Amino acid sequence: MTSASPVVDAGTPGASARREFERRAKRREQRIRAAHPKLAGLIHALTDDPQSTTAWDVGAVGEERLGRRLNDFATGTLRVLHDRRIPSTRANIDHIAVTPTGVYVIDAKRYRGRPHLKVEGGILRPRVEKLLIGTRDCSRVVEGVIKQIDVVRDHVGGDVPLHAVLCFVEADWPLFGVSFTARGVQVLPPKKLYAQLTAAGPLDIDGIATLHQQLAAALPPA
């Protein structure tokens, strides 16, 4: 008799970012109530959370929206994991997709503005690639995905194709030429990502299931 496949906890999209936002918002409310017991409700209603708090909500919404769509596409040959904790750190990986074309490490971002690549240097100076969203330099998020792909590489075989992806869910993407690569990381909108995840490739359904189980065990939910 063939044993049943292990049950995999795929995780909840945006769960750790949502918890952090709620923790910060609750702590702010408690501080207001401690400092102004009689006017706390009014002050809390009329003032906004600081940007350092709302950024967690913005990030959580982006992860939740992309995660829901990834779940919609999930099949036996497209298996997903969400909000995975990187061991020995406080960092997480937003989404991992195991597909016939390999393993995708996906960082979801909800930034406004048009993503584009700025290249500096060249013949006489070292080439430097910068990711800009509008006029904002967001190159640090590229570095973050590179670190995440290195973590995942440690848990899959060397012959498994790995794909690093930055997916901007609400960016001002142009009609044409909507994706590019920065330091080996694909930068693209959700529709381009979905097309890649559902493409045919060399990995079969059993290999995909095995990789999915390995990664779920090595990188637990955050």
Image: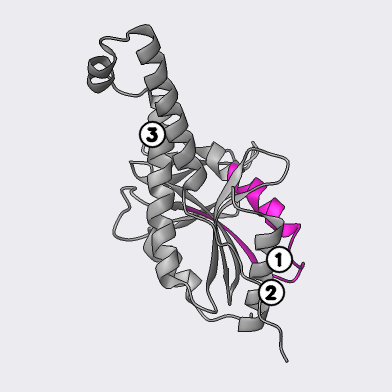
**In this figure, which residue is indicated by the disc labeled 2?**
210
Mark 3 or 1, nearer chain start: 3
Q: Which residues are magenta?
A: 144-166
**Marks 2,1: beta carbons within 8 A:** yes
**In this figure, which residue is indicated by the disc labeled 1?**
214
Distance (Cα) linking label 2 and label 1 = 6 Å
Q: Residue at x 74, y 60 (%)?
A: 155
Residue 79 vs residue 222, the one in the foreground? 222
- Asked if one can make out residue 168 in the rendered structure from this viewpoint, the answer is no
Distance (Cα) linking label 3 and label 1 = 40 Å
User: What is the three-letter code of the residue carrying label 3?
Assistant: Thr
- Count of numbered circles on the image: 3
- Asked if one can make out residue 123 in the rendered structure from this viewpoint, the answer is yes
Q: Residue at x 65, y 54 (%)?
A: 220
**Marks 3,1: beta carbons within 8 A:** no
Q: Residue at x 46, y 48 (%)?
A: 14
User: What is the three-letter code of the residue carrying label 1?
Assistant: Gln
User: What is the three-letter code of the residue carrying label 2?
Assistant: Thr
Alpha-carbon neighbours of circle 1 within 10 Å: few (<14), some, or many (≥20)?
Answer: some
